Amino acid sequence: MNYPKHKSEESVQDYLETILLLSQKQPNVRAIDIARELNYSKPSVSVAMKNLKSKEYIEVSELGHISLTEEGMSIACSVLERHTVLSQWLIRMGVTPEVALEDACKMEHDMSDESFQAIKNYLNTHS
């Protein structure tokens, strides 16, 4: 496994998920909003946005408003679904919501599709 590449992909997923969540709460998302939400420096977010734009995951308007492309939205929705399902699963098993949310954030990037689908199916049949 190429660990630096993995961390890079995890970062991309976190940024896309954050853009999606912010866009659900406010009409326009700017780099400064992302920096505040993630507690990152504005220059770090600016570099990340250039990277996301070059991968065609986001579009940036002349006013600096950031929106997800179709591919970016697909990735963001997938990551958000994993985060939501995993945190709910942990909470149902007795983990406190704060810890469940934090752990789900770690797990969402590393879990195989097979394991995620099994957890999701289990939760759907044992509701």
Image: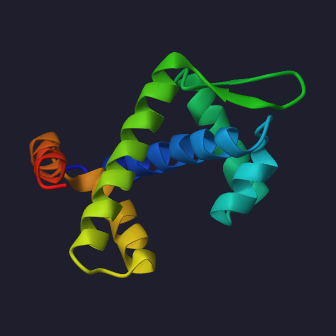
Which image quadrant for residue 92? Answer: bottom left
Point out residue 112 in the picture as x, y percentages from the top left corner.
Answer: 15, 46
Of residue 14 and residue 90, the one placed in the foreground of this image is 90
Q: Which residue of the protein is positioned furthest toward the right in this rendering?
A: 63
Point out residue 53 in the picture as x, y percentages from the top left corner.
Answer: 62, 26
Q: Is residue 111 left or right of residue 83?
A: left
Q: Does 87 sit above or below residue 9? A: below
Which image quadrant for residue 36? Answer: bottom right
Q: Is residue 55 left or right of residue 41?
A: left
Q: Does 16 sit above or below residue 103? A: above
Point out residue 62 in the picture as x, y percentages from the top left corner.
Answer: 88, 21
**Residue lying at 76% horizontally and 45% vertically, measured from the top left:** 31
Q: Is residue 120 left or right of residue 86?
A: left
**Residue lying at 68% horizontally and 66% vertically, measured from the top left:** 39
Q: Which residue of the protein is positioned furthest toward the front in this rendering?
A: 127
Q: Does 37 sit above or below residue 69? A: below
Q: Is residue 14 left or right of residue 5?
A: right
